[in-house]
Image: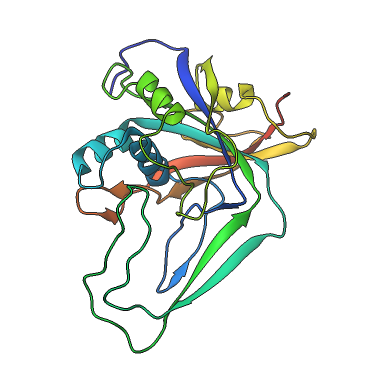
Amino acid sequence: MAETAPPPYSWLVLRLEAPLLAFGGVAIDQIGPTRDFPSASLLTGLLANALGWRRTEAAAHQRLQDRLIFAARLDRAGCGGILADSQNAKLEKSDRGWTTRGTPEGRDGASYDSPHRRRRDYHQDAALTVVLRLSPVAEAPTLEDLEQALIHPARPLFLGRKPCLPSVPLFQGTLDATTAHEALCLAPSMDTGTEKLRALWPSGEGPMEGEGVDQIVSLADQRNWITGLHGGTRTVVEGRIPRPAK
């Protein structure tokens, strides 16, 4: 879809930092892995939660995801590698769980005689920078709407899974740049060091070849919010960029 404003564009800068982070990947059976970078569906859900939308507003979620253009940079890889959380729980029909909407969540199914077992992977003490914009720019919600929602979210926010509560404010400011790659290079880092950092940006939003490009991949990270299933792919570039100054 054509832009309603010429470049350079305005970008929101987000800091994703927490003791535990989870960027859910393709799940097989009871195993829930984590990607290295946040997905389009994760950021859509995060922003929608900040706006106060309900999951039943599928068309609004879908439109927001379709408009989202973003890039991500790994500022700090964290410590200890991946934390694998093995969960064992015996679920009763009357059990209820905590939710971010302030109302306990109940179960409709029956009780289980045997424990319910699953594994969930997390990054430990990692920190990432995300730059994002919306296309077209004038459609609601606007980038300014998202900024205000991140500063004053309608509900508590989490980074992938409910235990992953941010340790710093998500919104870190705005900047102007022509492409997602340029915005990522301009976004300041809260961490020290001079090494190059792993990064991901969409096809057409930065270099597609050269020294800073590691690979071009077809990434399955989108959700069909109407059906509730993940499906569809987009082309992204995985590469490395110099660590920006603080």
Seen at 45% across and 15% down, the residue is: 9
Q: Is residue 136 left or right of residue 33?
A: left
Seen at 46% across and 32% down, the residue is: 70
93 to 13, vertically: above or below = below
Q: Is residue 240 left or right of residue 226?
A: right
All told, the count of numbered labels is 0
| Residue 118 percent coordinates (x, y) | 45, 74
Quadrant housing the C terminus: top right
Q: Is residue 49 left or right of residue 199?
A: left
Residue placed farthest to the top in the image?
6
| Residue 37 percent coordinates (x, y) | 53, 46
Instruction: Depth check: give the residue in front, 154 or 94.
Output: 94
| Residue 27 percent coordinates (x, y) | 42, 65
Q: Quadrant of residue 48?
A: top left
Q: Quadrant of residue 154?
A: top left
Instruction: Depth check: give the residue in front, 83 or 134.
Output: 83
Q: Is residue 26 left or right of residue 18?
A: left
| Residue 97 percent coordinates (x, y) | 36, 63
4 to 212, vertically: above or below = above
Seen at 31% across and 53% down, the residue is: 231
Seen at 62% across and 64% down, the residue is: 83
